[in-house]
Image: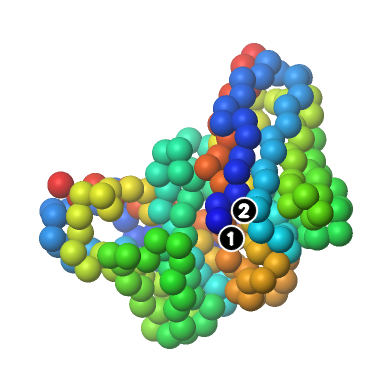
Amino acid sequence: QQPVQSPQAVILREGEDAVINCSSSKALYSVHWYRQKHGEAPVFLMILLKGGEQKGHEKISASFNEKKQQSSLYLTASQLSYSGTYFCGTEQATDSWGKLQFGAGTQVVVTP
Amino acid sequence: DVKVTQSSRYLVKRTGEKVFLECVQDMDHENMFWYRQDPGLGLRLIYFSYDVKMKEKGDIPEGYSVSREKKERFSLILESASTNQTSMYLCASSSSRPNYGYTFGSGTRLTVV
């Protein structure tokens, strides 16, 4: 039931771009994205609803393809502050309580 | 600044002990959640609550129970701690209004010896 994230890890130089993917085998109502820095709580970045919308947070944006039950997070012109582990959380279309299933995470390291 | 506060940052308990993990939120959120986080497995849902005295099992409820007597407080109970319950435990809360993100606590790292 947990969504599948890829890649597991990515190393970037400052200014480079990266894409993190999240896919589910279940019909989805929404996809959340969170970032967790080492030793800290995960922090909410954005939510995408079915309808295929795209959102942004700083130079981080995301898309949601509800037909494929897939979401992608785009890190554009990465900054050192983007380092951390990114999690997608998926809310199933059949779920009533807004509970999320989380992927295993993608570790992002941005180097100078 | 809105907060989810977990009572202990680090905890060491012995096998067989009853363990209580406390979580308090100050945002008047209806929904509260307990996850455990393990390397390579991400966050897995243990229990959640959508109202006072209401609780629902998540994906891995075995060996755990919960209590929600007040809206702001959600407790996770390990009835008889075992070494395979050594983990990072994260509490989160969210509004019942649609399309809200979760606010997480800083976590409790529990070690069972």
Question: Label 2 belongs to which residue?
Answer: A89
Q: Amino acid at mark 2?
A: Gly
CA–CA distance in space, label 2 to label 1: 5 Å
Q: Is residue B64 above or below residue A46?
A: below
- Which residue corresponds to the image point at 55% horizontal and 56% vertical from the top-left? A1
Which numbered marker is on residue A100?
A: 1
Question: In which quadrant of the rendered view does residue B96 lie?
Answer: bottom right
Instruction: Using the rendered image, report if marks 2 and 1 lie on a common chain.
Output: yes
Question: In which quadrant of the rendered view does residue A90 lie?
Answer: bottom right
Q: Amino acid at mark 1?
A: Leu
- Which residue corresponds to the image point at 81% horizontal and 54% vertical from the top-left? A67
Label 2: element kind: strand
Label 1: element kind: loop
- Which residue corresponds to the image point at 71% horizontal and 60% vertical from the top-left? A28
- Which residue corresponds to the image point at 66% horizontal and 19% vertical from the top-left? A12
Q: Position of residue A30 (x, y in %)?
A: 72, 60
Disc 2 and disc 1 in contact, CB within 8 angstroms: yes
Which numbered marker is on residue A43?
A: none
